Image: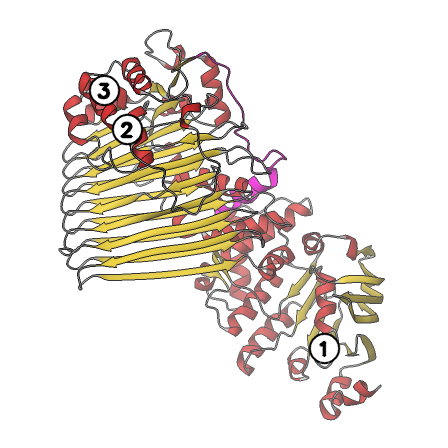
């Protein structure tokens, strides 16, 4: 109830500039030369002080990438990307090793402040526990491994995580400090040869997060990383690897915003999740990259490969995403249900406005016995945008008793946008039970008028109806993210009606 | 005192004139019934008063408490006290009725410069009102009108009327889709809201509804005009003789 109220309030306060996070920060940066070559790969690896095996891994990926072609099957349309006209590495120039928040460039801290990211608050909140029997979500602790451009500049809560045995650090550090873990798992879910963008990422990834939760440990806090593109013409190649060992649990939150600019920016992240026996990972995303201006100029190209491997029996991976930004979104967070009785979930809200193009969905690959999956997708198209759900549900021969439930709902606002649903279903085991439901509806004038007759403004009415439409998915988000997501939903739909 | 004054109102929908100079005055405390055959312009009148898009007023005036209603946005009219009980209330999936009521009530209060209700105050008020209308709390937790029976939808309209306390209530074909029992329950709710400060305009085809909501004045509409006005006995007369006499006129 208050969350919807929040949206209504937020819509009221929306000013002319729809994209509020469109600002740049002036800081010195350290760039690789423009273009992609073995030299670029070596430059990045060297910058990161990487061991030889890591460089080798990157170079193999790079050589593989040279033989690959850009995928064209998605329902997205964009000018050809000149991969030699991009920078592949950019980092704020480190003056010295950072030991506390005070040592961070004040410009950077200011940026976070504008974004409303409570880096300092987080520190203040340390040690505040909710009262017994009362879950106060605002006081729940969040650890922030902040990624500014491509390099992590601050990591908080390290001590407490360390006590629990949880490893949470930039992946560049993990490569040096925990090579055995990284070598064992990196590329084991998304192989270097997986797809054009994942292979590119494998060659040039700059940084990202690494999480390892040891057996039987329930991670004592939500883990959260904020990504942000800043440098002009810099491709962002984040790499995230999360491992939940036997019987462990972790919830990871990722949120993005990016500054406004004219040129398109390429973002090709890779996220790999691994759950062992009885383990669970909950991965939530609020994505708000710059979507381009009202004429469809600029905006982020977001080509992301996210995949989780339910490697152990009875393990679970849950993806929740709220996608409101980017000019182009190409993203299919997937689950490989390898362990018997493992479970995959995908909850998605994808909003497109203006000239945005979204082609997003999931893959649920049932390999183990009695595996189950659930897909709830809510697509909202407004303006002149195109919004496609593309999903694959497949049961392999040994996946006896596999079950899937899929519900894809699309909501159209206005008459110049499009919503498309492309489900692929394959069952090679006759005992599999797959259900698919899909609806497409238009936000009706009658519904809006009903709300307005009761005293709501047009924008409040749209906010209310859309929030009702996405409610099932919003409920899956951790509370603090649900509030942020509500804000984004209303901001991104501003000006979509009349 | 005149609450609503409609003066020589002419309205077009897509080039076709539906109301050809309609005049109607409703005073505080009065209940007016507007009767007429299909296509006579009854629902158009209710939509124009509420401000539904798609209607073009080409001539005439609508004054509400002396102010020009046609200059106001529909949500401003709501905040000023104009309430339309819809013939077909819409469904809003995922939006709990309770949340909808609170959002709407607070939007109206805010527009009037009044304090918004706090959660406990609102809950107290909505419980009190729904209890007086025999509306189960369970209904308030469901999505707005989602899966409601015809009777429940109309009771939800009456509940909103009771909660928002408008000074003008327009009931558009409230009897459509209701059986006798449901009709009686809804009508009882409406009757409980009759007051010296509040006026009602009851739009209906049938005299039947007027057995339950007894009007002070009855108007007969035909071809976009009020062709006859009289007391409640006019409705009975119509029931006996039909609309044909006015159609011919």
Farthest front residue? A67
B80 over A184 or under it: above or below:
below
The residue under the point 64% across, 45% down is: B110
Under tag 1, what secondary structure? loop
Chain under label 3? A
Q: Can residue A344 be seen in this view?
A: yes
Q: What number of labels is visible?
A: 3
Under tag 2, what secondary structure? helix
Quarter of image, res B57: bottom right
The residue under the point 57% across, 78% down is: B183
Q: Tell me if label 1 and label 2 are in contact, CB under 8 Å.
A: no
Label located before the other in sequence (2 or 3): 3
Farthest top residue? A95
In the image, B217 versus A247, the foreground residue is A247
* Badge number at residue B39: 1
- Please rate how many residues cluster around mark 1, counting C-alpha atoms within 10 Å: few if below 14, some from 14 to 19, many from 20: few
Q: What stretch is highlighted in magenta?
A: A1-29
Taking the magenta stretch, the answer to whether it contains residue B29 is no
Q: Where is residue B211 in the image (x, y as percent from the top left)?
A: 66, 83
Circle 3 residue: A55
Circle 2 residue: A202
The residue under the point 79% across, 81% down is: B231
* Badge number at residue A362: none
Kindly report the distance in space between the C-alpha atoms of the residues bearing marks 1 and 2: 69 Å
Q: Where is residue B6 in the image (x, y as percent from the top left)?
A: 82, 65
Quarter of image, res A205: top left
Taking the magenta stretch, the answer to whether it contains residue A25 is yes
């Amino acid at each position: 109830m208050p969350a919807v109220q929040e949206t209504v309030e937020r819509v009221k306060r929306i000013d002319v500039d729809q994209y509020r996070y469109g600002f740049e920060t002036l800081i010195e940066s350290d760039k690789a030369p423009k273009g992609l070559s073995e030299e670029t790969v070596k430059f990045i690896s060297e910058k990161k002080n990487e061991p030889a095996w890591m460089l080798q891994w990157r170079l193999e990926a790079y050589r593989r990438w040279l033989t690959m072609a850009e995928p064209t099957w998605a329902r997205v349309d964009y000018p050809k990307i000149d991969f030699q006209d991009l920078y592949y590495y950019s980092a704020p120039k480190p003056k010295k090793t950072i030991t506390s928040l005070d040592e961070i460039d004040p410009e950077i801290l200011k940026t976070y402040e504008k974004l409303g990211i409570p880096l300092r608050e987080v520190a203040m909140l340390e040690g505040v526990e909710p009262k017994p029997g009362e879950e106060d979500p605002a006081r729940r602790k969040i650890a922030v491994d902040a990624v500014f451009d491509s390099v992590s500049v601050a990591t908080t809560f390290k001590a407490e995580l360390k006590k629990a045995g949880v490893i949470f650090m930039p992946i560049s550090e993990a490569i040096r400090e925990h090579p055995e873990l990284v070598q064992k798992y990196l590329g084991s879910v998304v192989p270097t040869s997986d797809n054009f963008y994942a292979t590119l990422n494998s060659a040039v990834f700059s940084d990202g997060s690494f999480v390892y939760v040891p057996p039987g440990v329930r991670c004592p806090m939500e883990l959260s990383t904020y990504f942000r593109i800043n440098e002009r013409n810099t491709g962002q190649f984040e790499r995230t690897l999360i491992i939940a060992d036997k019987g462990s649990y972790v919830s990871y939150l990722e949120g993005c915003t990016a500054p406004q600019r004219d040129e398109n920016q390429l973002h090709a992240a890779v996220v790999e999740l691994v759950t062992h026996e009885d383990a669970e990972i909950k991965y939530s995303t609020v994505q708000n990259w710059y979507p381009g201006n009202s004429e469809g100029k600029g905006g982020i190209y977001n080509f992301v490969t996210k995949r989780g491997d339910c490697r152990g029996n009875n393990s679970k991976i849950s993806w929740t995403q709220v996608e409101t930004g980017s000019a182009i979104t190409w993203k299919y967070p997937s689950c490989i249900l390898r362990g018997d009785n493992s479970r995959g979930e995908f909850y998605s809200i994808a909003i497109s406005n203006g000239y945005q193009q979204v082609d997003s969905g999931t893959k649920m690959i049932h390999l183990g016995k009695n595996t189950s999956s659930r897909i709830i997708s809510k697509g909202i198209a407004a303006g002149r945008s195109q919004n496609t759900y593309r999903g694959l549900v497949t049961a392999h021969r040994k996946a006896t008793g596999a079950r899937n439930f899929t519900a894809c709902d699309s909501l159209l606002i206005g008459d110049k946008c499009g919503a498309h649903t492309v489900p692929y279903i394959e069952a090679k085991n006759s005992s599999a039970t797959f259900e698919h439901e899909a609806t497409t509806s238009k936000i009706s004038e009658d519904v809006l008028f009903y709300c307005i007759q009761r005293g709501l403004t047009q924008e409040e009415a749209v906010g209310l109806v859309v929030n009702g439409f996405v409610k099932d998915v919003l409920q899956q988000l951790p509370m603090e993210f649900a509030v942020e997501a509500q804000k984004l939903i209303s901001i991104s739909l501003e000006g979509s009606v009349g | 005192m005149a609450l609503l004054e409609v003066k020589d109102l002419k309205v077009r929908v897509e080039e076709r004139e539906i109301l050809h100079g309609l005049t109607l005055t409703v005073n505080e405390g009065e209940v007016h019934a507007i009767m007429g055959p299909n296509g006579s312009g009854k629902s158009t009148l209710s939509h124009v008063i509420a401000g539904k898009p798609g209607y073009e007023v080409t001539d005439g005036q609508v004054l509400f408490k002396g102010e020009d209603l046609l200059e106001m946005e529909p949500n401003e009219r709501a905040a000023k006290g104009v309430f339309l009980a819809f013939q077909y209330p819409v469904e809003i999936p995922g939006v709990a009725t309770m949340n909808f009521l609170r959002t709407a009530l607070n939007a109206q209060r805010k527009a009037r410069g009044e304090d918004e209700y706090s959660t406990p105050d609102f809950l107290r008020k909505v419980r009190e009102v729904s209890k007086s209308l025999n509306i189960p709390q369970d209904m308030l937790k469901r999505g707005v009108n989602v899966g409601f029976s015809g009777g429940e939808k109309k009771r939800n309209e009456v509940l909103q009327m009771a909660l928002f306390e408008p000074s003008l209530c327009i009931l558009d074909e409230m009897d459509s889709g209701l059986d006798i029992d449901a009709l009686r329950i809804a009508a009882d709710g409406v009757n409980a809201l009759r007051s010296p400060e509040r006026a009602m305009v009851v739009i209906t085809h049938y005299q039947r509804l007027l057995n339950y909501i007894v009007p002070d004045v009855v108007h007969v509409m035909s071809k976009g005009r009020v062709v006859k006005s009289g007391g409640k006995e006019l409705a009975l007369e119509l029931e006996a003789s039909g609309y044909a006499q006015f159609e011919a006129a």
